Image (cartoon, grey):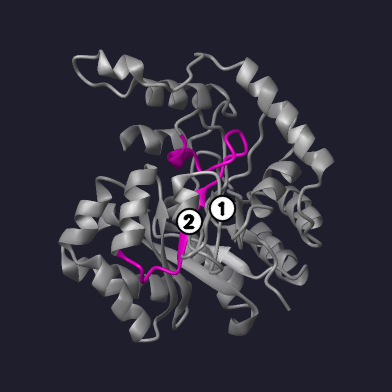
């Protein structure tokens, strides 16, 4: 049976304390995990620092200790911000195995490759390291998540053909991953691609990874586009294997699994609804900007003005009160 195209992102699990994501409501999380599996979905995505460093332990308690190992696939990540020496790579990896309770990871990612983290990953030889983990059978599939521009993505994929998938954010507002677009971005999911495919809408798509995997975290909620259309938009794109949603309640999980259980690509009528919403969003952008970048040529400091406008516009469309937004990561990069 083919893998269903919705993954459970363990980044925003239900919490007993709204001010402390580490105080996970384990009883509700267990019910959500059980329901997710009962409905035929199998892909779970976590990371070292999610939920105040407690997400991997929650995966062990709610998933690994309660369900057969062959009934699910689990992904986690190594983040450059927590490694200072080569020894740190194995220390964290071994702790992740202990925290999750698994002998091997189905998917393992270098977390958030960008212009800054790439220097760390190169200096600590993480590319050879992750290949070795796969050779040892401790990781089945290797990939990376990405929050930077198309040029860097193209470079990483060219220099490292060993990667089997990439985790990207996909944006229905521009039809591409926001990091790879010259235009504005909105709240968006993440996606992974595999090599040798030709995605049509951007250079990142052109360097996508064909047929191996695609994941995405974060449901898009903007304009008239309901989450169902936002998630299905991404899942309808060529070579997208998995759409991740960071679900923090049973209501969200039932909603997502309900329309993704028997996934159907967007119809032309639904694409028309998305296009209408995009028109409305574009009509209400805080700072109109075509992204031509002519202003950058005249700026003595070479400030990337259109990119900052794009991030601001996207932030103005965010749900108020969110503790983290993708724009913060792009701003740092």
The local crowd at label 1, few if under 14, some if 14 to 19, many if 20 or more residues have their Cα within 10 Å, is many
User: Horizontal and vertical percent for residue 83?
Assistant: 23, 59
Q: Quadrant of the N terminus?
A: bottom right
Q: Which residue is depicted at the point 73% across and 34% down?
A: 274
State the image quarter where residue 300 is shown.
Answer: top left
Along the line of sight, which residue is nearer the eye, 78 or 18?
A: 78
Q: Which residue is depicted at the point 36% across and 71% down?
A: 162
State the image quarter where residue 157 is shown.
Answer: bottom left
Along the line of sight, which residue is nearer the eye, 163 or 22?
A: 163
In this rendering, would 298 be left or right of 183?
Answer: left
Q: Earlier in the sequence, mark 2 or mark 1?
A: 2
In the rendered image, the residue lying farthest to the right is 269
Residue segment shown in magenta: 160-181
Circles 2 and 1 in contact, beta carbons < 8 Å? yes
Mark carried by residue 216? 1
Query: Exactly how many numbered labels are in the figure?
Result: 2
Q: Which residue is depicted at the point 18% across and 64% down?
A: 124
Q: Is residue 220 magenta?
A: no
Distance from the alpha carbon under mark 2 to that under mark 1:
7 Å
Pointer 2 residue: 167
The local crowd at label 2, few if under 14, some if 14 to 19, many if 20 or more residues have their Cα within 10 Å, is many
User: Horizontal and vertical percent for residue 16?
Assistant: 59, 48
- In the image, residue 183 sits, relative to residue 75, either above or below, namely above
What's the magenta bit mostly, secondary-structure-wise?
A: loop
């Amino acid at each position: 049976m083919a893998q269903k195209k919705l993954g459970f992102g363990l980044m925003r699990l239900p919490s007993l304390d709204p001010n402390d994501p580490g105080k996970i409501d384990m009883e509700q999380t267990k019910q959500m995990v059980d329901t997710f599996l009962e409905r035929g979905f199998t892909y779970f995505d976590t990371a070292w620092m999610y939920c105040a460093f407690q997400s991997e332990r929650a995966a062990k308690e709610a998933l690994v200790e309660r369900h057969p190992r062959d009934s699910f696939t689990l992904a986690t990540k190594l983040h450059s911000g927590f490694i200072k020496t080569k020894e740190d790579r194995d220390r964290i990896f071994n702790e992740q195995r202990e925290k999750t309770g698994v002998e091997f990871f189905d998917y393992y990612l270098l977390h958030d490759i960008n212009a800054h983290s790439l220097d760390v990953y190169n200096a600590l030889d993480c590319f050879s390291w992750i290949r070795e983990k796969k050779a040892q059978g401790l990781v089945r599939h290797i990939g990376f998540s990405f929050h930077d521009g198309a040029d860097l993505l193209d470079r990483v994929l060219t220099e490292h053909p060993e990667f089997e998938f990439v985790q990207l954010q996909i944006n229905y507002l521009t039809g591409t991953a926001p990091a790879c677009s010259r235009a504005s971005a909105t709240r968006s999911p993440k996606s992974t691609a595999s090599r040798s495919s030709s995605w049509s809408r951007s250079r990142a798509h052109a360097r996508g990874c064909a047929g191996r995997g695609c994941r995405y975290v974060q449901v898009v909620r903007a304009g008239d586009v309901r989450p169902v259309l936002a998630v299905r938009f991404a899942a309808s794109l060529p070579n997208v294997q998995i759409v991740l949603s960071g679900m923090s309640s049973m209501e969200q999980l039932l909603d997502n699994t309900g329309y993704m259980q028997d996934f159907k690509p967007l119809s032309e009528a639904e694409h028309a609804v998305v296009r209408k919403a995009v028109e409305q969003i574009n009509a209400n952008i805080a700072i109109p900007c075509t992204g031509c970048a002519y202003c950058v040529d005249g700026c003595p400091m070479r400030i990337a003005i259109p990119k900052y406008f794009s991030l601001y516009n996207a932030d103005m469309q965010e749900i108020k009160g969110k503790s983290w937004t993708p724009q913060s990561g792009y701003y740092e990069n």
